[in-house]
């Protein structure tokens, strides 16, 4: 029997979707038909969350309802707070986030009931920043800061990290990050949440799967590496020489290349703008280092279709917000849960369980031999 | 652009595999070329675990090494024990199992390091029965019973549930259950562990995804329903009439029909044999009720290809072992983790990240309108 193997499911379409599309040729990301260039400058994460869930931007009443629902669901339930208290000092942020979201189910009186799916997903989306901020503070030997109900999703997260309100331009940069990373089609983490959802498992299971899948270095992992690279280069004047040596040795330079884009990732310009607005005098050389790396790589590899991806900038932006590298993938999760949850809703509209096949190529017709004769 | 949509990935082959194959026409399940009819009577779960991981049955030395590794990894790490202590009374077993396996990562000094994958997976396989037994006892207001190192995987599980050693025929029935449910190709839970693994995420993430996916009622859920049915029928003499009424009303009868098998599921005969060996006098009528249901359904629907599946028997067998229905899917997980972990190993042999596509069918080219004009 000869069958075609679709390794990695490359080019296999599993469904129709109204959530997003990516134009890799021209470098445009559309969320339900809106260019993210417009969304990131004209809307907030809360509006984008409503868009991804409902395929239209909210009017004032809808936005107020969603905002209030989110604001009133920020507190950590007792069992989750205890898990963080006991284990946040030693565990990795992504292991904590995955476990804590899974444990949110403990305080849901009926976790399997999908009739109140929106309430469950609001609770997950809203609690994830509280989990991550608590983990951050406990790791530093500080008390977690309880959430505030009067702040935006982005503003409250930075407040819980620091214990004081962030400046408006910092909140805007955080909000932009959440919008830019909110959704990107059927990537591996989103796909894993869809596979889990397809058995009608609870959203606690679905989002837990997605967090676990995002954790893998092939998916969420290059932001930290770029920070290491810039630190390793040390100063802008050494950057060109450093890149040239790497290229001569045919080494990979982190922050470049993407499976989808044939041009610069459209999110880069927005991260760059936020970086320019946030940077202090001491950070000028860091930013120049990035730009020199980018120019040097583009001059040498641009004609091969190797262009900057978001990793080149987003880590630096998060660094300027005072967020340490081991929390970058966690921030990615705070954003992407918008897309994960949107795909959970969409999968359940017309569900079919996801069960592909594998072709058996092993031994056949074996007989069990007693253990002493094996 | 017209593309073919592979909803549910039905008929799509994602890879080659040497782990198992199912012959649905003739009702045979092969684990790496061995008929499970032979494995279940001639080997133990530990031997089957070795087989699924290594594609050959262990010799004495290999079996001893694996057994000792499993036996010495049974204790719950402190953070996991605390989670169960605090939450097992109110949370569902599957929510506890998913969260606890995720939290096993907390006490791994290097959870992301895949070089010691076998050690990590042995720890997961070996700890899952301890987690489930502890949850069971805490739910009943009892102290968890620490594992014993001198018992088999199946025997130790029953010991931890009860606080005393089970009879040999009970241990054999438990062992048979673990073998029969150990693996079944690329089902949804196994697939979700493969998707998560494909980003090079840790096995804590992969197995957590699988547990969450198994939790869904479309996957692991019909054993409980059969128990409810037999209880509802009440006695063997009412069974035929009960079934006929259901069939006349075109209602579905739980415990029948399977996507793959055109004959009786090959696992049924083994569950039936264990039931016959375990049943007490008081359980005779219960067993006759099942048989009358089976005969009546087969007489009416056998020619339509509707045959018994394992759910018809396995719940009853677990009930005879004293295991309550809300723990049945958890038992399924204790068995299936053998298959999940085997597929994790196989995926990493020649990994490609799993990223299918979706066809965008939503609105296009929208412009952001100020919120007061929406």
Image: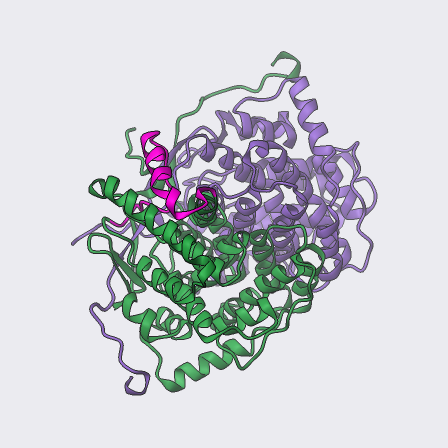
Chain colours: A purple, B green
- Residue B154: x, y in percent? 48, 71
Please report the residue visible at 62 percent of the width from the left and 38 percent of the height from the top.
A178
A242 in relation to A181, above or below: below
Residue B247 colored magenta?
yes
Residue A54 in the image: state x and y as whole percent. 54, 25
**Which residue appears farthest toward the top when viewing the image?**
B373
Whether the magenta-drawn stretch holds residue A317 is answered as no
Q: Quadrant of residue B123?
A: bottom right
Rendered location of residue A181, percent (x, y): 57, 40
Front-lying residue, B276 or A40: B276
Image quadrant where residue B297 sits: top left
In this picture, is B170 found above or below A127? below
- The magenta-colored residue range is B232-261
- Please name whichever residue, A143 or A243, is drawn nearer the observer in this view of the structure: A143
Residue B194 visible in this rendered orientation of the protein: no
Q: In the picture provided, is A169 more to the left or to the right than A62? A: right
Left/right of residue A94 with respect to residue B3 in the rendered view = right
* B71 and B231: which is toward the camera: B231
Question: Closest to the observer: B25 or B197?
Answer: B25
Counting every numbered tag in the picture gives 0
- Residue A154 in percent (x, y) is at 70, 37
Check the image and report above or below for A248 versus A344: below
Res. A64 in view? yes
Q: Residue at x 54, y 30 (%)?
A: A52
Residue at point 67%, 39% (across, down): A126
Quarter occupied by the C terminus of chain A = bottom left
Q: Quadrant of the N terminus of chain A?
A: bottom left
């Amino acid at each position: 029997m000869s069958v075609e193997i679709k390794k990695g499911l490359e080019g296999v379409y599993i469904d129709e979707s109204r959530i997003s599309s990516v134009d890799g040729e021209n470098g445009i990301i559309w969320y339900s038909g809106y260019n993210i260039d417009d969304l990131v400058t004209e809307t907030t994460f809360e509006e984008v969350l409503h868009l991804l869930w409902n395929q239209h931007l909210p009017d004032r009443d809808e936005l107020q309802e969603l905002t209030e629902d989110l604001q009133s669901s920020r507190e950590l339930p007792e069992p989750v707070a205890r898990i963080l208290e006991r284990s946040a000092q030693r565990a990795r942020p992504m292991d904590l986030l995955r476990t804590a979201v899974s444990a949110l189910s403990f305080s849901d009186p009926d976790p399997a009931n999908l009739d109140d799916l929106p309430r469950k997903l609001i609770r997950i989306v809203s609690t994830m920043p509280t989990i991550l901020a608590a983990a951050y503070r406990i790791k530093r030997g500080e008390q977690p800061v309880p959430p505030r109900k009067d702040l935006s999703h982005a503003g409250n997260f930075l407040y819980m990290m620091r214990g004081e309100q962030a400046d408006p331009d910092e909140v805007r940069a955080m909000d932009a990050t959440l919008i830019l990373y909110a959704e990107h089609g059927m990537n591996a983490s989103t796909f894993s949440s869809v596979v889990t959802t397809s058995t009608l498992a609870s959203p606690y299971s679905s989002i837990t799967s997605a967090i676990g899948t995002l954790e893998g270095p092939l998916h969420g992992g290059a932001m930290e590496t770029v920070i290491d690279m810039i630190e390793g280069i040390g100063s802008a004047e050494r950057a060109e020489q450093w890149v040239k040596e790497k290229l001569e040795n045919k080494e990979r330079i982190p922050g470049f290349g993407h499976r989808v884009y044939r041009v610069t990732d459209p999110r880069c310009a927005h991260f760059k703008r936020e970086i320019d607005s946030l940077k202090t005098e001491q950070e000028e050389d860091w930013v120049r280092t990035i730009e020199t790396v980018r120019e040097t790589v583009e001059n040498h590899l641009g004609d091969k279709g190797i262009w900057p991806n978001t990793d080149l900038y987003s880590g630096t932006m998060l660094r300027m917000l005072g967020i340490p590298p081991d929390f970058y993938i966690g921030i990615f999760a705070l954003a992407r849960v918008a897309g994960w949850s949107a795909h959970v809703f969409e999968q359940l509209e017309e569900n079919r369980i996801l069960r592909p096949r594998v072709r058996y190529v092993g031994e056949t017709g074996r007989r069990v031999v007693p253990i002493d004769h094996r």
